[in-house]
Amino acid sequence: QVQLVESGGGLVQAGESLSLSCVASGVTFSINNMGWYRQAPGKQRELVATITSGGSTGSTSYADSVKGRFTISRDNTKNAVYLQMASLKPEDTAVYYCNAKRYYTSTIFTNYWGQGTQVTVSS
């Protein structure tokens, strides 16, 4: 099993920055991709950013709505993933969830989720 604990959420004004952290514990050697998702009230959970485990930095991908504003990074030595959010907008308001995936094959994987951290951006 893998446990994920997020931190760093809060209330900021539009245009400001905020950073989220997520630390994994448990069977961490089994983790492949890590990422961040978010869920706003009344909406489905959506992907924000992901990062693979390969190499020293990993390969990243972002939702179009956050490209150029958010940066995902990973520290494999600390089993941690980070999300730096800049130029925040009110529409970024949501509960942000850390995600880790353990792949068994290219299409079969297990999802692990953190408890979520609230990010609120006021206008």
Image (tube, rainbow, N blue to C red):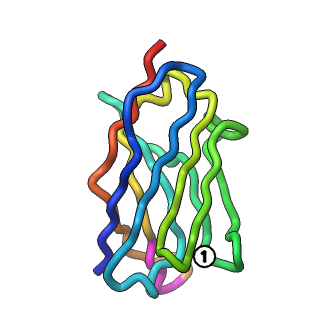
In the picture of the structure, the residue carrying the numbered disc 1 is: 53
Local packing at callout 1 (Cα closer than 10 Å; few below 14, some 14-19, many 20+) is: some
- Residue 43 can be seen in this image: yes
Residue 91 point in image, percent of width and height: 49, 24
* Residue at the top extreme, as displayed: 123
Of residue 94 and residue 73, the one placed in the foreground of this image is: 73
Q: Is residue 92 above or below residue 99?
A: above
Magenta-colored segment: predominant secondary structure: strand
Residue at image point 39% right, 41% down: 9
Q: Is residue 44 visible?
A: no
Tally the marks. Answer: 1
Determine if the magenta segment contains residue 8.
no
Residue 103 lies in magenta, yes or no?
A: yes
Task: Tell me what residue is drawn at x 32 percent, y 76 percent.
Answer: 2
Which span of residues is magenta-colored?
Answer: 101-105
Quarter of the image for residue 61 reads bottom right
- Say which residue appears at 54% left-offset and 79% top-offset: 77
Instruction: Compare residues 11 and 28 and report the one nearer the observer.
Output: 11
- State the residue in front, 50 or 85: 85
Amino acid marked by disc 1 = Ser
Can you give x and y, in whole percent of width and height, for residue 100 in the image? 43, 68
Secondary structure under badge 1?
Answer: loop
* Quadrant, the N terminus: bottom left
Rendered residue at 54%/23% (across/down): 89
Q: In which quadrant of the rendered view does residue 87 lie?
A: top right
The relative height of residue 47 versus residue 27 in the rendered view (above or below) is: above
Q: Position of residue 66 (x, y in %)?
A: 62, 37
In the image, is residue 85 above or below residue 2? Answer: above
Residue 55: x and y in percent read 71, 79
